[in-house]
Protein backbone atom coordinates (compact mmCIF):
# COMPACT_ATOMS: atom_id res chain seq x y z
CA UNK A 1 0.00 0.00 0.00
CA UNK A 2 1.03 3.59 -0.64
CA UNK A 3 0.40 6.72 1.39
CA UNK A 4 1.86 9.59 -0.58
CA UNK A 5 0.77 12.29 1.86
CA UNK A 6 0.74 11.75 5.63
CA UNK A 7 1.74 14.05 8.49
CA UNK A 8 3.44 11.38 10.58
CA UNK A 9 5.05 13.89 12.94
CA UNK A 10 1.63 15.29 13.88
CA UNK A 11 0.06 12.05 15.16
CA UNK A 12 -0.28 11.76 18.94
CA UNK A 13 2.43 9.03 18.91
CA UNK A 14 4.64 9.52 15.83
CA UNK A 15 7.05 6.76 16.85
CA UNK A 16 4.29 4.15 17.15
CA UNK A 17 2.70 5.31 13.88
CA UNK A 18 6.03 5.02 12.08
CA UNK A 19 6.61 1.55 13.51
CA UNK A 20 3.17 0.42 12.37
CA UNK A 21 3.88 1.68 8.86
CA UNK A 22 7.13 -0.30 8.82
CA UNK A 23 5.46 -3.43 10.20
CA UNK A 24 2.79 -3.22 7.48
CA UNK A 25 5.40 -2.61 4.72
CA UNK A 26 3.73 0.60 3.61
CA UNK A 27 5.32 3.05 1.19
CA UNK A 28 4.87 6.43 2.92
CA UNK A 29 5.76 9.98 2.01
CA UNK A 30 5.91 11.77 5.35
CA UNK A 31 5.23 15.44 4.68
CA UNK A 32 6.20 18.36 6.89
CA UNK A 33 4.64 21.78 7.36
CA UNK A 34 7.80 23.73 8.24
CA UNK A 35 11.48 23.38 7.33
CA UNK A 36 12.38 23.32 11.02
CA UNK A 37 10.32 20.13 11.43
CA UNK A 38 12.15 18.23 8.69
CA UNK A 39 15.19 16.91 10.56
CA UNK A 40 13.21 15.55 13.50
CA UNK A 41 10.59 14.01 11.21
CA UNK A 42 13.25 12.42 9.01
CA UNK A 43 14.87 10.93 12.12
CA UNK A 44 11.62 9.05 12.84
CA UNK A 45 12.12 7.05 9.64
CA UNK A 46 15.91 6.86 9.47
CA UNK A 47 15.82 3.04 9.45
CA UNK A 48 12.62 2.69 7.39
CA UNK A 49 13.41 1.67 3.81
CA UNK A 50 9.94 2.53 2.53
CA UNK A 51 9.39 5.89 4.22
CA UNK A 52 10.66 9.17 2.81
CA UNK A 53 10.40 12.60 4.42
CA UNK A 54 9.37 15.61 2.34
CA UNK A 55 10.57 19.13 3.05
CA UNK A 56 7.61 21.48 3.38
CA UNK A 57 6.33 24.94 4.19
CA UNK A 58 2.54 24.85 4.38
CA UNK A 59 0.69 27.79 2.82
CA UNK A 60 -1.59 28.16 5.83
CA UNK A 61 1.40 29.12 7.98
CA UNK A 62 3.50 30.83 5.31
CA UNK A 63 2.98 34.19 7.02
CA UNK A 64 4.44 32.95 10.31
CA UNK A 65 7.21 30.78 8.82
CA UNK A 66 8.44 32.74 5.81
CA UNK A 67 11.65 33.40 7.72
CA UNK A 68 12.46 29.67 7.33
CA UNK A 69 12.98 29.94 3.57
CA UNK A 70 16.79 30.07 3.99
CA UNK A 71 16.59 26.87 6.05
CA UNK A 72 14.45 25.33 3.30
CA UNK A 73 17.16 26.08 0.75
CA UNK A 74 19.84 24.68 3.07
CA UNK A 75 17.96 21.39 3.57
CA UNK A 76 16.75 20.91 0.00
CA UNK A 77 19.84 18.93 -1.12
CA UNK A 78 19.02 16.36 1.59
CA UNK A 79 15.80 15.11 -0.02
CA UNK A 80 14.21 14.45 -3.42
CA UNK A 81 10.75 15.13 -1.98
CA UNK A 82 9.08 18.47 -1.23
CA UNK A 83 5.78 19.06 0.55
CA UNK A 84 3.47 20.14 1.82
CA UNK A 85 3.73 23.34 -0.20
CA UNK A 86 1.28 25.34 -2.32
CA UNK A 87 -1.41 27.97 -1.99
CA UNK A 88 -4.64 28.26 0.00
CA UNK A 89 -7.33 30.64 -1.20
CA UNK A 90 -9.61 30.23 1.80
CA UNK A 91 -11.27 33.51 2.87
CA UNK A 92 -9.72 33.27 6.33
CA UNK A 93 -6.26 33.47 4.70
CA UNK A 94 -6.94 36.39 2.37
CA UNK A 95 -4.58 38.61 4.33
CA UNK A 96 -1.65 36.23 3.78
CA UNK A 97 -2.17 35.72 0.05
CA UNK A 98 0.74 37.85 -1.15
CA UNK A 99 3.12 36.13 1.27
CA UNK A 100 1.84 32.71 0.19
CA UNK A 101 2.48 33.53 -3.46
CA UNK A 102 5.99 34.77 -2.74
CA UNK A 103 6.87 31.73 -0.61
CA UNK A 104 5.47 29.25 -3.14
CA UNK A 105 7.21 30.89 -6.07
CA UNK A 106 10.49 30.98 -4.14
CA UNK A 107 10.21 27.27 -3.31
CA UNK A 108 9.56 26.45 -6.96
CA UNK A 109 12.60 28.52 -7.91
CA UNK A 110 14.72 26.55 -5.44
CA UNK A 111 13.42 23.23 -6.74
CA UNK A 112 14.18 24.29 -10.32
CA UNK A 113 17.70 25.34 -9.39
CA UNK A 114 18.23 22.03 -7.58
CA UNK A 115 17.33 20.01 -10.68
CA UNK A 116 13.72 19.25 -9.83
CA UNK A 117 11.91 17.49 -7.00
CA UNK A 118 8.84 15.32 -6.45
CA UNK A 119 6.39 17.82 -4.95
CA UNK A 120 3.10 17.27 -3.10
CA UNK A 121 1.01 20.41 -3.43
CA UNK A 122 -1.91 22.01 -1.58
CA UNK A 123 -4.30 23.92 -3.88
CA UNK A 124 -7.52 24.51 -1.89
CA UNK A 125 -9.51 27.29 -3.60
CA UNK A 126 -6.34 28.20 -5.50
CA UNK A 127 -5.98 25.64 -8.27
CA UNK A 128 -5.66 28.17 -11.09
CA UNK A 129 -3.00 30.17 -9.28
CA UNK A 130 -1.06 26.99 -8.38
CA UNK A 131 -1.16 25.87 -12.00
CA UNK A 132 -0.01 29.33 -13.16
CA UNK A 133 3.00 29.09 -10.85
CA UNK A 134 3.80 25.54 -11.99
CA UNK A 135 3.56 26.58 -15.63
CA UNK A 136 6.07 29.35 -14.99
CA UNK A 137 8.47 26.86 -13.33
CA UNK A 138 7.96 23.67 -15.33
CA UNK A 139 11.49 22.54 -14.48
CA UNK A 140 10.65 22.44 -10.75
CA UNK A 141 9.82 18.74 -10.99
CA UNK A 142 6.87 16.36 -10.74
CA UNK A 143 3.82 18.10 -9.28
CA UNK A 144 1.31 16.00 -7.32
CA UNK A 145 -1.93 17.82 -6.53
CA UNK A 146 -2.98 16.42 -3.18
CA UNK A 147 -6.75 16.13 -2.50
CA UNK A 148 -7.61 18.17 -5.61
CA UNK A 149 -10.87 20.10 -5.15
CA UNK A 150 -10.88 22.51 -8.07
CA UNK A 151 -13.27 22.69 -10.99
CA UNK A 152 -13.41 20.27 -13.91
CA UNK A 153 -11.86 22.91 -16.13
CA UNK A 154 -8.98 23.33 -13.67
CA UNK A 155 -8.61 19.56 -13.49
CA UNK A 156 -8.32 19.32 -17.26
CA UNK A 157 -5.69 22.05 -17.25
CA UNK A 158 -3.77 20.17 -14.53
CA UNK A 159 -3.91 17.01 -16.63
CA UNK A 160 -2.70 18.91 -19.69
CA UNK A 161 0.21 20.30 -17.66
CA UNK A 162 1.28 16.80 -16.67
CA UNK A 163 0.30 16.95 -13.01
CA UNK A 164 -0.17 13.88 -10.83
CA UNK A 165 -2.90 13.43 -8.20
CA UNK A 166 -3.12 11.80 -4.78
CA UNK A 167 -6.54 10.77 -3.50
CA UNK A 168 -7.60 9.39 -0.15
CA UNK A 169 -10.50 7.77 1.69
CA UNK A 170 -11.95 11.12 2.81
CA UNK A 171 -11.94 12.52 -0.73
CA UNK A 172 -13.35 9.32 -2.22
CA UNK A 173 -16.13 9.16 0.37
CA UNK A 174 -17.90 11.99 -1.42
CA UNK A 175 -19.67 11.92 -4.78
CA UNK A 176 -17.74 14.93 -6.10
CA UNK A 177 -14.41 13.40 -5.14
CA UNK A 178 -15.24 10.13 -6.88
CA UNK A 179 -16.48 11.95 -9.98
CA UNK A 180 -13.31 14.03 -10.21
CA UNK A 181 -11.12 10.97 -9.67
CA UNK A 182 -12.93 9.13 -12.45
CA UNK A 183 -11.69 11.67 -15.00
CA UNK A 184 -8.09 11.77 -13.74
CA UNK A 185 -5.59 9.72 -15.78
CA UNK A 186 -5.34 6.36 -13.98
CA UNK A 187 -1.60 6.26 -14.65
CA UNK A 188 -1.08 9.50 -12.71
CA UNK A 189 -2.99 8.66 -9.51
CA UNK A 190 -1.61 7.58 -6.15
CA UNK A 191 -3.24 7.06 -2.77
CA UNK A 192 -2.90 9.19 0.37
CA UNK A 193 -4.36 9.42 3.86
CA UNK A 194 -3.67 13.09 4.73
CA UNK A 195 -3.77 11.86 8.31
CA UNK A 196 -4.21 12.91 10.98
CA UNK A 197 -6.05 15.91 9.47
CA UNK A 198 -8.38 13.90 7.23
CA UNK A 199 -11.07 11.96 9.06
CA UNK A 200 -13.81 9.42 8.37
CA UNK A 201 -16.73 9.33 10.81
CA UNK A 202 -14.82 11.56 13.20
CA UNK A 203 -11.79 9.26 13.33
CA UNK A 204 -8.40 10.53 12.08
CA UNK A 205 -7.07 8.48 9.20
CA UNK A 206 -3.81 6.54 9.47
CA UNK A 207 -1.53 5.60 6.57
CA UNK A 208 -2.83 2.03 6.47
CA UNK A 209 -6.35 3.37 5.90
CA UNK A 210 -5.37 3.94 2.26
CA UNK A 211 -6.66 0.42 1.70
CA UNK A 212 -10.14 1.97 1.53
CA UNK A 213 -8.91 4.30 -1.22
CA UNK A 214 -7.51 1.34 -3.13
CA UNK A 215 -10.88 -0.40 -3.02
CA UNK A 216 -12.68 2.77 -4.12
CA UNK A 217 -10.30 3.15 -7.05
CA UNK A 218 -10.83 -0.47 -8.04
CA UNK A 219 -14.55 0.28 -8.35
CA UNK A 220 -13.97 3.49 -10.29
CA UNK A 221 -11.58 1.73 -12.67
CA UNK A 222 -13.73 -1.44 -12.87
CA UNK A 223 -10.78 -3.66 -11.96
CA UNK A 224 -10.03 -6.07 -9.13
CA UNK A 225 -8.54 -4.82 -5.86
CA UNK A 226 -5.33 -6.65 -6.78
CA UNK A 227 -5.13 -4.96 -10.18
CA UNK A 228 -5.75 -1.54 -8.64
CA UNK A 229 -2.91 -2.08 -6.16
CA UNK A 230 -0.59 -3.27 -8.93
CA UNK A 231 -1.43 -0.18 -11.00
CA UNK A 232 -0.72 2.13 -8.06
CA UNK A 233 2.64 0.48 -7.38
CA UNK A 234 3.58 0.88 -11.03
CA UNK A 235 2.55 4.55 -10.84
CA UNK A 236 4.80 5.01 -7.81
CA UNK A 237 7.71 3.42 -9.63
CA UNK A 238 7.30 5.78 -12.58
CA UNK A 239 6.85 8.83 -10.37
CA UNK A 240 9.99 8.20 -8.36
CA UNK A 241 12.10 7.85 -11.51
CA UNK A 242 10.51 10.95 -13.06
CA UNK A 243 12.90 13.33 -11.33
CA UNK A 244 16.65 12.65 -11.40
CA UNK A 245 16.33 8.92 -12.17
CA UNK A 246 20.10 8.54 -11.98
CA UNK A 247 19.76 9.39 -8.26
CA UNK A 248 16.91 6.94 -7.60
CA UNK A 249 16.74 6.32 -3.85
CA UNK A 250 15.11 2.90 -3.84
CA UNK A 251 11.74 4.15 -2.55
CA UNK A 252 9.85 1.80 -4.85
CA UNK A 253 12.39 -0.79 -5.93
CA UNK A 254 10.72 -3.54 -3.90
CA UNK A 255 7.05 -3.39 -4.88
CA UNK A 256 5.69 -6.61 -3.42
CA UNK A 257 3.28 -4.94 -0.94
Image (cartoon, helix red, strand yellow):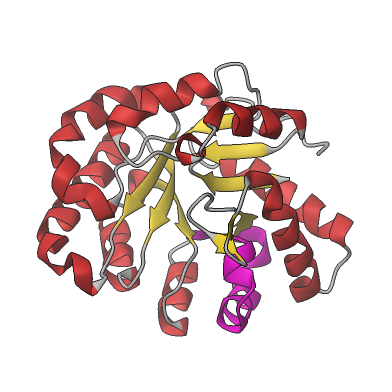
Q: Quadrant of residue 179?
A: bottom right
Location of residue 2 in the rendering, given as x and y in whole percent from the top left corner: 67, 45
Above/below status of 201 relative to 16 = below
Query: Can residue 162 be seen here?
Result: yes
Towards the viewer: 233 or 125: 125
| Side of 140 where 250 appears, left or right | right
Query: Can residue 241 be seen here?
Result: no
Residue visible at 26% across and 59% down in the picture: 133
Towards the viewer: 219 or 22: 22
| Side of 56 where 98 appears, left or right | left
Towards the viewer: 172 or 128: 172
Q: Is residue 178 magenta?
A: yes
| Side of 60 where 217 appears, left or right | right
| Side of 148 where 236 appears, left or right | right
Residue span colored magenta: 163-188
Location of residue 94 in the rendering, given as x and y in whole percent from the top left corner: 15, 69
Residue visible at 74% across and 75% down in the picture: 220
Location of residue 47 in the rendering, given as x and y in whole percent from the top left corner: 61, 16
Q: Quadrant of residue 31?
A: top left
Amino acid sequence: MIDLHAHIDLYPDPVATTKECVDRNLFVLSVTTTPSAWSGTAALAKDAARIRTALGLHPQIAQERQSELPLFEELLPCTRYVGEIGLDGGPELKGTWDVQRRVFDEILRMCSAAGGRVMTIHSRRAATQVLDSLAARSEAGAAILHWFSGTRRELQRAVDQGCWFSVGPAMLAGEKGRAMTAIMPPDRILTESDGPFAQINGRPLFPWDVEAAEKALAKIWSVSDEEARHRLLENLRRLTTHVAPEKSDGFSHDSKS
